[in-house]
Amino acid sequence: MASRIALITGANSGIGFAIAKELAAAPEGFHVLLAGRTLSKVESAISEIETSGHGANGLTALELDVTNQTSIQTAASAVKQKFGRLDVLINNAGIENRDTDLVTKFHETFATNVLGPVLVSAAFRSLLLASPAPYSVYIGSVTSSLTSIVNPDSYLRTTTAGTNAYRASKTALNMIAMHEQLEVKDTPLKVRIMCPGFVVSNLRGTSEEARSGGGRAGDPASSARLLLSILRGERDGDAQGLITTSGVCPW
Ligand SMILES: NC(=O)c1ccc[n+]([C@@H]2O[C@H](COP(=O)([O-])OP(=O)(O)OC[C@H]3O[C@@H](n4cnc5c(N)ncnc54)[C@H](OP(=O)(O)O)[C@@H]3O)[C@@H](O)[C@H]2O)c1
């Protein structure tokens, strides 16, 4: 019997998938709800975890497009009906849209990376509050840091082609997370935001060069271990910062 129910958005790929694998193998006994906008991709991800011999406490596929309010509400109703609560919500789904059309780039990026997590968190809030020790974790990015972009010595003082929408969306997400933390301060719900590090995924594109960030990107398993350490309370001292594997990134 699973002792904790965890839902990950965008769980079929990259960091979300690495987190799903980590939780499925963790001794806490997580039942992992892998959410994604394409059910067949989520089902393949589940098969891969099962083949690796993990997921004994349950793996459930959930269709959830974070830009579609009906899809979010349907997923929340399904979780309510099946489990009656949620112990961990991980707002992971995200995009880095570099469309040359500014309206398209900003609309799509903010719809997925900012409004998406806002709507998902709102839809699952009552289920999280039905848990005795719930966590709401947002996957942010150190590229959001305003302190770093004005620091002449920071490697984050860059303006790589078209990443302004992505970086601004993650800056907004920092506020969403800290705002939620304040909203629920009188409840058991712990809200955290973490940067997974620069790791291999489909975020920058699906070619091998893009996935590996030109060979510089790390293993998303390290992001998943960071997430698990947060859920174990090991980073509670960093609750009011953007948590990274090596410390806290200035806002
Ligand atoms: N990789 C890095 O170096 C890095 C660094 C800092 C932060 N991050 C953050 O980490 C998170 C995960 O990204 P990733 O790097 O693992 O990239 P990824 O491999 O592209 O994974 C992103 C996931 O989000 C899903 N997604 C996108 N739009 C969605 C929508 N509308 N509804 C539901 N799911 C949606 C994708 O689904 P599809 O497969 O259907 O597209 C995919 O499962 C993102 O928030 C990203 O900003 C990544």
Image: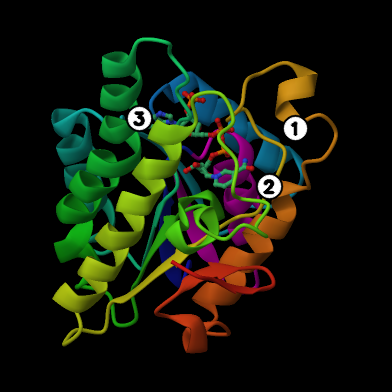
Residue at 19 percent of width and 45 percent of height: 119
90 with respect to 44 (left or right): left
Q: Nearer the viewer, residue 173 or 66?
A: 173
The answer to which of 122 and 213 lies nearer the viewer is: 213
Counting residues from the N terminus, which is met first, the one under dot 3 or under dot 1?
3
* Above or below, 40 relative to 170: above
Q: Residues within 10 Å of mark 1 (few under 14, many from 20)?
A: some
Q: Is residue 110 above or below residue 250?
A: above
Residue labelled 2 has its Cβ within 8 Å of some atom of ligand 1 = yes
Residue found at the far top of this picture? 101
User: Does the magenta run of residues contain 22?
Assistant: yes
Q: Residue at x 67, y 42 (%)?
A: 49
Start-end of magenta stretch:
11-34
Q: Which residue is mark 1?
A: 213
Q: Which residue is mark 3?
A: 109
Quarter of the image for the C terminus: give it: bottom left
Earlier along the polypeptide chain: callout 1 or callout 2? 2
Name the residue beneath numbered marker 2: 198
| Amino acid, disc 2 | Phe
Q: Is residue 163 left or right of residue 202?
A: left
Label 1's element? loop
